[in-house]
Amino acid sequence: MIKVEGKGGKAVFRVFDGLSKAGIDHHGNVYSVCQGSGYAFTNDYYKHDLTWILIDTHGIGIVLLSGIETLKLKKWLHESSNNQIEGRVLNG
């Protein structure tokens, strides 16, 4: 059985809550994802030239994936807690 306890379990929900509040507006636009890039040999390129853009396609995908996985975890935790309660009642 997977244990999702303490800081690790709570972190998933806190991170997605922060992401959805700070990185997604009420229209579903995703903010602050760096744009896709080539490569460079200087730090300045990554620090100054490579900026973020609104609703970059690779950013949308990872945000959707994180939301899906958060919902799956929430559902799994709910089902697990119900199964543990039912098991105690049946085997109690």
Image (cartoon, rainbow, N blue to C red):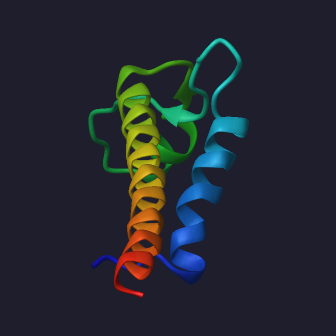
**What residue lies at 36% left-to-right and 76% top-to-bottom?**
90
Q: Residue furthest bottom?
A: 92
Residue 90 lies, with reference to residue 34, above or below; the image says below
Which residue is painted at 40% across and 50% down in the image? 42
Does 26 sit above or below residue 62? above
State the residue in front, 86 or 43: 86
Q: Is residue 47 left or right of residue 80?
A: right
Q: Position of residue 89 (x, y in %)?
A: 44, 77
Left or right relative to 57: residue 43: right
Question: For the view shown, which residue lies furthest in the top direction?
Answer: 27
The residue sitting at 64% across, 28% down in the picture is: 24
- Judge whether 68 appears above or below 5 on screen: above
Count of numbered marks? 0
Indicate the quadrant containing the C terminus: top left, top right, bottom left or bottom right. Answer: bottom left
Residue at 45% x, 44% y: name it.
71
Q: Position of residue 32 (x, y in %)?
A: 59, 34
Q: Position of residue 56 (x, y in %)?
A: 44, 21
Quarter that holds the N terminus: bottom left
Q: Nearer the viewer, residue 50 or 24?
A: 24
Where, by quadrant of the figure, is residue 61 drawn? Answer: top left
Compare residues 56 and 76 and report the one nearer the observer: 76
Residue 45 or residue 92, whichever sits in front: 92
Q: Where residue 2 appears, x then y in whole percent?
A: 32, 76
Quadrant for residue 88, please give it. bottom left
